[in-house]
Image (cartoon, coloured by chain):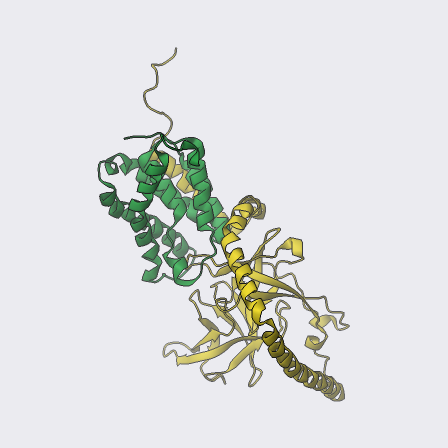
Amino acid sequence: MYVPASSLFIATSLVIALILNFLPLQGDLLIARPDFVAFAIAYWNVNHPHKLGMSVAFGMGLMVDVGNAGILGQHALAYCVIFYLTQIFGRRLRLFSLLKQAPQIGFFLLIMQIVFALVALSSGSTLPGWRYFHATIAGALLWTPASFAIALLLKPKPDSSAL
Amino acid sequence: METAPQFFRNGPGPFARLFIFAILSCLLIAEDTRFKYFPQLRQTIGVIIFPLQKIAYIPSDIYDQVEKLITSFNLLEENVKLRQLYLDRREQLLRLEALEAENTHLRRLLGAVQQIETTAKTKVVLAEIQYTPRDPFNHKITLNKGSYHDIELGQAVIDDKGIIGQITQLYPWSSEVTLLTDKDHAVPIQVVRNGLRSIVSGTGKNNELELRYLSVNTDIQQGDLLVTSGIGGVYPPGIPVATVLKIEQDSAGDFALVTSAPIAGVNRNRQVLVLSLAQVESNNSLETPTIESGTN
């Protein structure tokens, strides 16, 4: 059941993801927060391929980098990697149920975080603790409910003007 | 001659695209960590995302307002408490002024050079911590005041206990502070107990600073308070930085491994002070501090 998503809907979702990424959280909550932008890129790439270009992922990465006060290009590279992975494996993923997709998305998010860590290490940072990967788990857990919710939103009949 | 209708998108394949963008990212990363040719790029993106960040702060703003409303109920009690505190501090301040006067007097008697510290005036801007980034690699925080509020690069940021860090990136309405714990950050310090001067550097780990290149027989003890020495002119002198946690003897080298913990914390309160050392009108050119330290 493929429902085409309008470009406006996708753009809005990306902006919301950016805002969620910029939420001023602290402590454990901050560490466990999934990367919403990576999540959104993965979602659109798996379910609606060819709607996004890699340049969009790159641009979003730059914005997150500046918002995060990090190295410019770090998120950009990580998002390009997850864009590539979901583009290559997206069709295969869609064969699975939402529940079975979650661990595989988790694996992609893990690869993305490792790329991210490698960039940081190359600029001389120390290795982070295992808690750093909580965000990956959170992202994987979020996949099933969030995909379900977005699919509900995209259903054309009742209120397509909701967003 | 036109080709057949396109069934597939053409252009470079996924891997080729990834390759191009990966190279672009790597160039950017190298540019950002090493060369810094285009500081405007970061500023421009910062201005673009500012409204989004503003929206993201709305929930916490609402929370603040509610909290303010609740605290306003016991304002009277708080007022009494603060008055008490004010009187206490006032008394300390008076004593400090007397000591300062005595100090300059004694110095003059000794014929010593007028210490630069006493003449340095500081200007203060109150700011709020807006955002602490997630990734554990970068020890930076974002403040809600920027160049628009007369904040400048290189200014010191303190809380009620001691030094937090230094402004390293300016946007019009916000600014980034590199914390003491950042691996590229160093502060000139002085041990309160014996006046020993050294430099304390971040390690990239939370709550850990280190004193590098102190020889094993240096007079330093566990629990020693380290304050800024004022050398370099970025940090005003005498502000607490860290306490010495442990001293290990490196059997191989000649240096002691001195680990210390920062005194100020970003987790405790949201209000911080941004200090700027006003130019000192000093007549001895030897000790005039320069303020433009730039990044780190």
Q: Position of residue B11 (x, y in %)?
A: 38, 27
- Number of numbered discs on residues: 0
Residue A72 appears in the picture as rendered: no
Please report the residue visible at 34 percent of the width from the left and 31 percent of the height from the top. B13
Q: Colour of chain B?
A: yellow
Q: Position of residue A33 (x, y in %)?
A: 38, 54
A130 sits to left or right of B176: left
Q: Position of residue B85 (x, y in %)?
A: 62, 80
Q: Position of residue B219 (x, y in %)?
A: 50, 85
Rendered image quadrant of residue B72 = bottom right
B90 sits to left or right of B6: right
Front-most of B14 and A106?
A: A106
Q: Residue furthest top?
A: B1
Please report the residue visible at 75 percent of the width from the left and 73 percent of the height from the top. B284
Asked if residue B73 is positioned above or below residue B110 in the image, the reply reads above
Front-most of B142 and B9?
A: B142
Please report the residue visible at 46 percent of the width from the left and 76 percent of the height from the top. B260
Asked if residue A49 is positioned above or below residue B281 in the image, the reply reads above
Front-most of A161 and A93?
A: A161
- Viewport quadrant of the C terminus of chain B: bottom right
Please report the residue visible at 35 percent of the width from the left and 58 percent of the height from the top. A132
- Viewport quadrant of the N terminus of chain B: top left
Q: Colour of chain A?
A: green
